[in-house]
Amino acid sequence: MTWKRKILRWIDEEEDRLKSSGECSLQYVILDMSTVGNIDTSGISMLDEVKEILHRRDLKLVLANPVAEVMKKHDKAKFIENLGQEWIHLTAGDVVAACNFMLHTCNKPSPMKEESEQ
């Protein structure tokens, strides 16, 4: 089984688990890249495909712990530009904090909107 299929299967399983338990829906998929010491064009292409599939499913791909060599290749392939630098973090803790921040700030109505509705 390819990594792409494994990632998508894990996402499907997690979405099914969340639906059956009545919990909130999945919004972010975090990939810890710390064990990826090198990546080739097929690996970058696979990540790009996963990103696009997630985008169509209204999910956001977020990367944690990328090593310098992998970041250089992502940059050269324009993957960072395509993903967005704000979705790449140095530690898993940073990723979780950023996603948590987005969950709590993006879902709240803006004060200006509330005032105009009154």
Image (tube, helix red, strand yellow):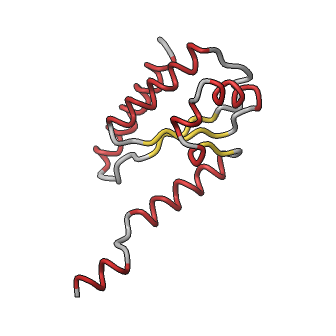
| Residue 43: % across, % down | 58, 17
Residue situated furthest bottom in the rendering:
118
Report the number of numbered marks.
0
Front-most of 22 and 115?
115
- In the rendered view of the protein, which quadrant contains the C terminus? bottom left
In which quadrant of the rendered view does residue 15 lie?
Answer: top left
Residue 59 to residue 44: above or below: below
Residue 91 to residue 76: above or below: below
In which quadrant of the rendered view does residue 5 lie?
Answer: top left
Q: Residue at x 46, y 66 (%)?
A: 105
| Residue 38: % across, % down | 72, 20
Task: Please give left or right for residue 92 compared with residue 112 in the image.
Answer: right
Task: Please give left or right for residue 91 compared with residue 3 in the image.
Answer: right
Q: Residue at x 63, y 35 (%)?
A: 32
Front-most of 76 and 106?
76
Residue situated furthest right in the rendering:
68
Q: Residue at x 59, y 38 (%)?
A: 63
Residue 56 to residue 118: above or below: above
| Residue 78: % across, % down | 58, 29
Residue situated furthest left in the rendering:
117
Front-most of 96 and 116?
116
In which quadrant of the rendered view does residue 50 lie?
Answer: top left
Q: Residue at x 39, y 41 (%)?
A: 59
Task: Please give left or right for residue 61 compared with residue 107 in the image.
Answer: right
| Residue 27: % across, % down | 41, 47
